[in-house]
Amino acid sequence: MNKLSAVIGFTFMNKVRTKSFLITTLVLALLLTIGIHIPYFIDKFTGNENGPVTVGLVYSDYPELADSLEKYHDRLAASGMRFSKYEQADTALDKDLGDGKIAGYLQFVKTNAESFPEVNYVSKKDSISSGVQTELQAALQSVKTEFITKGTLSDAQVAELNAPVSINVHKLEDTQGGTQNGEDSSKERDFSPANFAVMYALIILFFMTIMMTGNMISAEVTAEKSSRIMEILITSTSPLAQMFGKIIGMFLIGLLQIFVFTAVIAANLSLPHNRASLEGYELDFSQLNPSVLILGLVYFILGYFLYATLFAAVGSLVSRTEELGQAVMPITMLSLAAFYIGSFSMSAPNSLLMKVCNYIPFFSPISMIVRIGMGTPKTWEIIVSIVVLLIAIYVFGWLSAKIYRTGVLLYGKRPTIKELRKAMKAYKI
């Protein structure tokens, strides 16, 4: 145990002090800061200011339509724009547009007496912001309905006519009170922005941790092997303590980076100009399902150790760092496949593909995080998936330890499977 803690401490401190680690962490933190501020920079460079966008509304041609549009807008609980009333399109309107007092103006143009008039939006640019366009289209649709019906419908009927139709999804129940797939319909989980945010963050962090720390583990083993220092280390420490000491040490380094990145993101999002954009996502973490966070962290840790043992074993087989990229490619492809399966199946977390991936240890960490966050996995599915993952960690950990013990002492050309198997038989863990 003392030797294991010594290897963990040595690996952690030795890597944290390197310039490459410090520079990489600093650059990634800087990129995160820039990425979070991109919307703010775009608003500044395009001349947009914080607060509602002011749009001019010309009354001269269709005063009743302009009045209906303004009344509809006033009834909105929240809006990203406001109207400024103009009696007609004249030089005063053009001057306000040129001075930047309004972002553009809206004008109804006559076509014929029966049909709804054309709507023109005039601005200094050849485009309209997506938020203003969405809000204007919804308001104009209501005004158009009122114009066509010509007062034959009440305000309540017009509102009902314009209200979007919601689709409620239910599972088909059988005659025994269950569902067609034997699942309890009461377990249908409503969409929660907080659950989705935590689930997506865990997936991204899992993939980033595997890619960064996994490659660091294999590179560390290969570098020690190529310098022949491994011949000394392998005689002073058991291969299991040495391998898992490196894995746990690199895991702590990954957690340190995650903590730094989380602090950077939180600090940037807490700034006043970013806080308003965050409120638009309606993230209420008091509604977070604790199982999403707890089970998500369990799969995060178990998945990391599974992939880390494989990276360590592969690194021990390579004698030169130039060959490392090609050697770890199969493990990289497995992690990419797991990431893409989980990402593209978020809209169908209970699909057959996701259920099958629950029991494939290379894919189950991400697939189960998605199912727990968005779907309705049964308790026995979670238990069986964790058991399979633990068995896989034990098997691949045992196999990786034997490969590690024999591979680190094989120099020159990459050993063949026959040579590796013969060397592994001579060593027992």
Image (tube, helix red, strand yellow):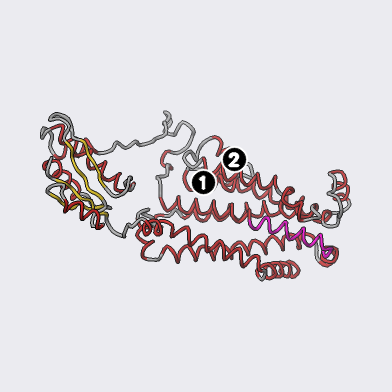
> Which residue lies under the disc numbered 2?
357
Residue type, numbered disc 1: Val
The mark found on residue 370 in the picture is 1
Circles 1 and 2: CB atoms closer than 8 Å: no
Task: Point out the image quarter for the C terminus.
Answer: bottom right
Q: Secondary structure at mark 2?
A: helix
**Residue drawn where x is 41% and y is 31% of the image:** 173
Q: Secondary structure at mark 1?
A: helix
Q: Is residue 78 visible?
A: no
Please name the predominant secondary structure of the magenta segment in the image: helix
For the record, the magenta segment spans 212-229
Find residue 138 and report its image quarter: top left
Q: Is residue 81 magenta?
A: no
Q: Is residue 227 magenta?
A: yes
Position in image of residue 216 (x %, y %)? 68, 59
Q: Is residue 423 left or right of residue 286?
A: right
Name above or below for residue 110 compared with residue 15.
above
Position in image of residue 322 (x %, y %)? 76, 53
Q: State how far apart marks 1 and 2 are (Cα).
A: 11 Å
Q: Is residue 427 left or right of residue 107?
A: right
Name above or below for residue 169 compared with residue 103.
above
Closest to the observer: 295 or 365?
365
Closest to the observer: 326 or 287?
326
Q: Is residue 170 visible?
A: yes
The mark found on residue 361 in the picture is none
Position in image of residue 184 (x %, y %)? 45, 39
Please tell me which of labels 1 and 2 falls first in the chain.
2
Mark 2 packing: few (<14 Cα in 10 Å), some, or many (20+)? many
Residue type, numbered disc 2: Cys
